[in-house]
Image (cartoon, grey):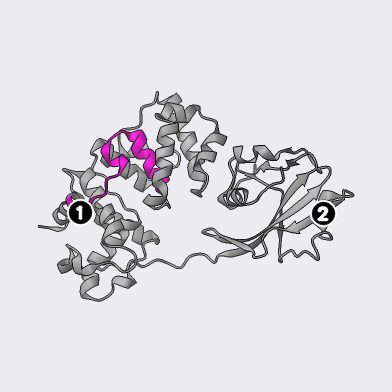
Amino acid sequence: MNFKEKLTHWYSINKRSLPWRKTKNPYHIWLSEIILQQTQIKQGLPYYEAFVKEFPTVFELANANEQDVLKLWQGLGYYSRARNLHFTAKYIANDLQGIFPNNYKGLLQLKGIGDYTASAIASICFDEPAAVVDGNVYRVLARHFGIHTPINSTKGIKEFKELATSLLDSHNPSEYNQAIMEFGAMQCKPNNPDCGQCVLQESCVALQTKTVTELPVKLKKVKVSKKHFNFLVLISSKGETIFKKRTGKGIWQNLYQFPLIETEQPLTSSNFKIHPTIMDYFQDLDFEFSLYNKDTIVHKLSHQHLHTKFWIVEIDQLPEKGLPISKLKEFPAPILIGNFLDEFRFPL
């Protein structure tokens, strides 16, 4: 058997039973692919099931309030995926009468869909011979063919796409694409792959040259920045707090948060009240405060690490319009704040 035959045979025996593999409905395939971007299957599966239950078709998703979509997405991160998902659902439902484009080029025009996702939907739903190249595919190809070109370089992206296309089973692109992705996820794992049990071991260049741990090659990432976030959890005598939508561009756009003060250095209890932003925000209002988390919570994002503190501020009158504490969990929030809401016991 050749490369593609070995992969598809392996897949027929070892593939996992997943709900989106039991359908060719482009809505379900699209939904699963967007959810699984930057997300492992074990984490994404409950979200997929929740979305399908809440929004059975693209029309229900299109008609949903963005706040409800973001709330259901809460915890998955990369919230631009959810915003793009909702935008595209409205476009498909309203402009395309609920019918997805049935080819790679048409799918590529949709917001939030790039080369990989367009290839996956086109091949799985419409049997178009479009080769997928995701992280798993990069790893399998780099190791098997001994390719040291960085996968996140312009040259590498082109080289791996051309190789993947040349290997594609044009008669059964759906099965082959899913096979090579599954093989990368389950067999040719990033760390400690079981090469002794691999069906490709005899032809794997990385195994023969002992370079499995070196491949694939990636260019070094941009330096991660460090920020100090201070959230003010206000609690008024009326049982109200302040929880507002972030309207600016950024990772948490349209999500809700407590008033935020970003500082260059860690804020301490001794300089909390005299910090200029704090003094300006509260002006002459009297309040008591305490630090909720003694150890700084480090929330790691791809490009920055947020060193976070939650300050509990008890106050008689809020400095701006608030809302009942009992309604906090109705709003979509970053997982960092969602975890706090699950842990902290607000006074009744």
Asked if residue 135 is among those painted magenta in the image, a careful observer would answer no
| Residue type at numbered disc 2 | Glu
Quarter of the image that includes the C terminus: top right
Asked whether residue 296 appears in the rendered view, the answer is: yes
Find the residue positioned furthest to the bottom: 210
Residue 178 picture location, percent across and down: 26, 48
In this image, 81 relative to 102: left or right?
right
Residue hosting label 2 = 288
Asked whether residue 108 appears in the rendered view, the answer is: no
Residue hosting label 1 = 167
**Given this view, does label 2 or label 1 mark the residue nearer the observer?**
2
Quarter of image, res 56: top left
By secondary structure, the bulk of the magenta-drawn segment is best described as helix
Quarter of image, res 254: top right
Vertical position of residue 30 compared to residue 152: above or below: above
Asked if residue 33 is among those painted magenta in the image, a careful observer would answer yes
Q: What stretch is highlighted in magenta?
A: 13-36
* Residue in the image at 67% along x and 38% along y: 326
Vertical position of residue 16 compared to residue 67: above or below: below
| Residue type at numbered disc 1 | Leu
Residue 337 picture location, percent across and down: 61, 50
Q: Earlier in the sequence, mark 2 or mark 1?
A: 1
Q: Distance between the residues labelled 2 and 1?
A: 66 Å
* Residue in the image at 59% along x and 64% along y: 225
Quarter of the image that includes the N terminus: bottom left
